[in-house]
Amino acid sequence: MLKQYIEIKERNPDSILFFRLGDFYEMFGDDARTASRELDLVLTTRDKAEDPNDRTPMCGVPYHAYEAYVARLIAKGYKVAICEQMEDPATAKGLVDRDVVRVVTPGTLMESSMLDESKSNYLCAVYFDETSAICFADLSTGDISVTEFPISDIRHMENELSSFSPAEAILGGMPEGVMRLKEHLTARLDCLVQVDNERFNTWNAEGRFSCVPPYGTQENRPPVFDHFGPEACAELDPAAICAASALLSYITETQKTNMSHLRTIRRNLSGSCMELDINTMRNLELAGSLRSGERKGSLLWVLDKTKTPMGRRLIRNWVLRPLLHSGLIKRRQTAVFELVNATVARGEVSVALRSISDIERLIGKIVYGNAVCRDMKALSSSINALPELAVQLAPMKCTALREAAGMDMLSDIAEMIDVSIKDDPPFSVREGGFINDGFDQEVDNLRYLLENSTAMLTSIESKERERVRKKLKIGYNKVFGYYIEIPRSVSDDVPDDYIRKQTLANCERFITQELKELETELLSAKDSLAELEFRLFEELRIKIAAEVERVQATAKKVAEVDVFCSLAEAAVVNNYCMPDIEVSGVVDIRDGRHPIVEIMQQGSLFVPNDTFLDGDASRMAIITGPNMAGKSTYMRQSALIVLMAQIGSFVPAKSARIGIVDRVFTRIGASDDLSAGKSTFMVEMTEVADILKNATSSSLLILDEIGRGTSTYDGMSVARAVLEHCADKRKLGAKTMFATHYHELTELEQYIDGVKNFNITAKKRGDDIIFLRKIVPGGADDSYGIEVAGLAGVPDTVIKRAKAVLKMLEEGKRGDGGSASFLPKKEAEPPSPRFPLDQLSLADMGGSEIASILSTTDLNTLTPLEALNLLYELKKKL
């Protein structure tokens, strides 16, 4: 058996092998040590070697509970190969034949217990060359798509990967690009990655097939053509064909089963959806909060009031991939608008949706072959809820809802399931008991035999008592089966057809031909019934699997209706308005609110603000004001409102006109990347560089505190140069919101057309500061940094010292100046004779100010760093 194990393990070296032995999956050797460590299992052995170090370690998990253990290993980045017994141990001659039936990886999960129902679970193949492509597939739902990159721009590929966030990726192609994409996937997306150039080389455009139809012979034709057909792949470029073929070959290799629910390959066309980089998704908290990464505190959390798993996945997709086509946006808007104004109908639709399970993943399991009876009943129950949903949608007038009302009701599929399977079936399909009475005559006969076995035995027992006229009883044990037991005192006087089976101290046990035949029937009936019911279940599964395309189409309609209802509900509950979608490039928001902040801080009043940006006279807003006053919140809310509008949602404002933007960029917050050797300022500048390279005049830029990670003058210089570049129509001319504490930058309003100053108001009362959070034209007069430090709890002594230093700086002074009464004053020492003052005419070089600073500076109290800073300031004055 170990030899068999080793042979199978050698074929699956990169996976932990779950080796089926009876009712357990066992692991041996290094796999056992790994599983023991990761799953907290006890190591044992059956090896009899004298030296404990020579014994083969082993550990195992019950086969009926394997999913939980596999899920834990997958979550830790392992692959698991499931090795099953390929024949019945009761009938096998010698060692039971075993083989791997499936390799479980993060991207190929099918079990509901291992999947998050609110997000898709993507596996992807990335081919990087002069032209590149990424193919994504969610095996649990049957969704498969490909994105082509005519010019291999790694940044665009990284953004595409970020929006799909795959769980597993296979990479191939040019090494420099592959390595960078691998770093992005592992470090930023926590994705399991393997580089497998050979898999891609098999199907690359220069190798096995021509770029002209019919793409090679039948023998060497890429898998994508055999799976989808040449017509479906006619528009795919060679890189896309290579990526899709590599992905399909990997799926076939690991899953070893039918993947017919991957029916249609979809092209993700450039220009149909907005491209968002990972920094923008993170900074705007689209799918997870900035602090914890959890769903609560994100835009998705605000908008997601869906009732079905399909709807939850679709609304996430919409949030991360806003539309760029005004017609598609208005199609969604119209559906949401009608549901907003149909309160009763919206409530009834929501009630109907609650009765619908995850149709997409249920049909995926049925096609895949790991569905059980309860999955079948969940599908039929969901289908039976569709007519009520259609009834509620029927009066609707908009195109999207009317199309949904006319969806395929799938009633024939539900009827097949309900006729054959009981309403409350057992979990296992291997033990029978789930086929309805009257569905199959043979099942009824076997079930009647089992249910009436007691009566049959009682009948035989009564008949034998009458025949032999002696005391007897019929019994059963596992060794001898059924028997007739007669006391030894009368056991010699029995009929000739009685066959002695066993002799005991007080009795004799016999069998008869009739009893033996009944025993055979009863003992085989249970196994026969279970086998027959499983065969009928498989026949039903195959019939339903053949209708996968119909079920997937209906599931998509249901998901879309669910998202429309969710957006409508969010609009009503949160008092949103319907924005006007334009192509003018104008962003005009009246009384806009931050959709997340206003909900998270419901106990306080949220102050709404206006935003107006265009591509001309108001294309750039420089925003100044105190720390904590709300500059960042104001800018983010403007970006979120634009994104919500292009999702098709209503927006948190009194009114809004949104000119479609092609991309939204954000540079917010301070963070380093020490693992990559990047300081906070280097990360900031890298993000700025990416924005300036990829933004267009139709983009929206949100820039917060550019240049703060370096010295004051360096930072201000960089910030001004960035502002001038963004404002210059010849270079960029994008709609830009720029928050800064460099008040000197507000002067740009006088010199550059299209630049406007705004500030967030605050009132100062003594040492207290009140944030009014209202945006008004003009620059701020103060940043109130010291007051905010006081609000944060900085000790009073530090605050007092900060105020004293600020006063000196504002008066143009440097050093201590004897201004802090709580510091001991020391007499200044005379200048060192090595540096006589008469050797340099300070008066000729503006030296009176320098002399004043030197005369009031106590050199004994200066730290080396303070002395260096002082010298630097003195040199600048010279």
Image (cartoon, rainbow, N blue to C red):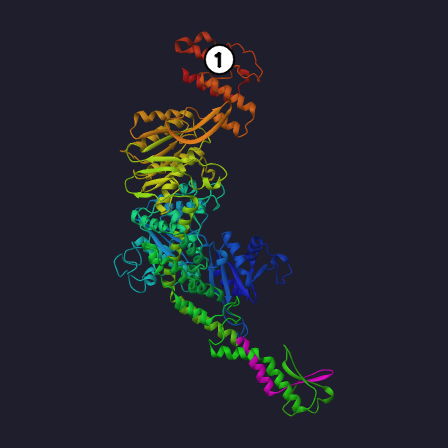
Q: Residue at x 70, y 87 (%)?
A: 471
Q: Which residues are magenta?
A: 501-527
For residue 558, what is the image quadrant? bottom left
Q: Position of residue 749 (x, y in %)?
A: 32, 26
Q: Residue at x 50, y 77 (%)?
A: 443
Q: Depth check: give the residue in front, 133 or 574.
A: 574
User: Residue 474, relative to residue 296: is it above or below?
Assistant: below
Q: Quadrant of the C terminus?
A: top left
**Amino acid type of the residue that numbered disc 1 sits on in the rendered structure:** Leu
Report which residue position mark 1 lands on.
854
Residue 536 visible here:
yes
Residue 202 visible here:
no
For residue 546, what is the image quadrant? bottom left
User: Residue 694, relative to residue 265: is it above or below?
Assistant: above
User: Is residue 516 inside the magenta stretch?
Assistant: yes
Q: Position of residue 151 (x, y in %)?
A: 30, 46
